[in-house]
Image (spheres, rainbow, N blue to C red):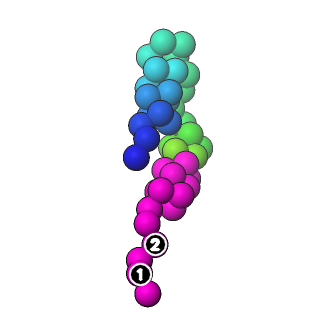
Amino acid sequence: MTVNPIAATLLAALLIGEPITPNLLIGLVAVFAGIWIATSQPKPA
């Protein structure tokens, strides 16, 4: 699993004062869901 979205969010908040909004958190969840779907192995049938 990649941590780039978390790192980018934290660095943006710390370095340039980017606000962490509910929409941003929802977007992060969506990104992680996509990463999880793309990298998970299908169960054998």
- Using the image, determine if residue 10 lies above or below residue 38: above
In the rendered image, residue 6, in percent from the top left (x then y), is placed at 44, 35
Q: Can residue 42 be seen from the camera position used here?
A: yes
> Tag 2, which secondary structure?
loop
Quadrant housing the C terminus: bottom left
Foreground of the two, 15 or 38 = 38
- Using the image, determine if residue 15 lies above or below residue 9: above
Q: Residue at x 46, y 20 (%)?
A: 11
> Do labels 2 and 1 touch, CB within 8 Å?
yes
Q: Can residue 13 be seen from the camera position used here?
A: no
Q: Which residue is mark 1?
A: 44
Q: Which residues are magenta?
A: 30-45
In the rendered image, residue 2, in percent from the top left (x then y), is placed at 43, 41
> Tag 1, which secondary structure?
loop
Q: Residue at x 49, y 29 (%)?
A: 9
Q: Amino acid at mark 1?
A: Pro
Q: Which residue is mark 2?
A: 42
Mark 1 crowdedness (10 Å alpha carbons): few <14, some 14-19, many ≥20: few
